[in-house]
Amino acid sequence: ESFEEVRRVRVHLAKKPIKHLNEIDMYKGDLLANVWFQDRILRIDLESGNVKEVYEFSGLWPKDDRPKEADCFNGIAVDHERDTVYLTGKLWPKVYEVRLIAPP
């Protein structure tokens, strides 16, 4: 109700701190976040701050194919009913619907 901060979680991958987390959304009890100016999403355990999975999206719309005005990858929205995630970027004319699959 108040938007008062109640807790912070330090995020790390292989014991290295991760900074510049940008767009975030909840996904199956974990936090999805993108790293600013990177085409990847991290799946983060909220209790430990450990990165559980790194999803690479550099091939979704490669930087070399984007017009100059299409800024960074930074939009995440989860559709919990369909179990899909919508991805986009700042000033992107496209929205992509993807399903996140854990590696074997």
Image: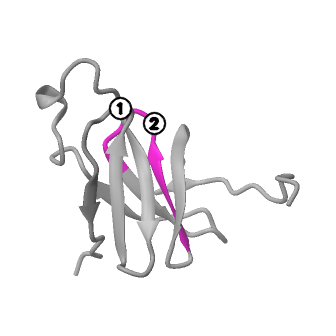
Closer to us: 10 or 101: 101
Q: Give the dominant element type of the magenta stretch: helix, strand or loop.
A: strand
Quadrant of res 12: bottom right
Q: Is residue 18 visible?
A: no
- Compared with 50, 59 (above or below) is above
Q: Quadrant of residue 29?
A: bottom right
User: Disc 2 marks which amino acid?
Assistant: Trp
Q: Is residue 93 above or below residue 100?
A: above
Q: In the drawing, does residue 19 fall left or right of residue 98?
A: right
Disc 2 target residue:
36
Extent of the magenta region: 30-40
> Residue shown at 18%/28% (left/top)?
66
Please identify, in this view, whether the residue under mark 1 or under mark 2 is nearer the observer: 1
Q: Are marks 1 and 2 in contact (CB under 8 Å)?
A: yes
Does residue 31 belong to the magenta stretch? Answer: yes
Q: Give the residue displayed 26% in from the left and 65% down from the top.
A: 98
Q: Earlier in the sequence, mark 1 or mark 2?
A: 2
Query: Is the N terminus in the top left, top right, bottom left or bottom right quadrant?
Result: bottom right
Instruction: Work out whether 3 lies above or below 89.
Output: below
Q: Say whether residue 101 is visible.
A: yes
The crowding category of the residue bearing disc 1, from other C-alpha atoms within 10 Å (few below 14, some 14 to 19, many at least 20), is some
Residue that mark 1 sits on:
72
Q: Is residue 39 magenta?
A: yes
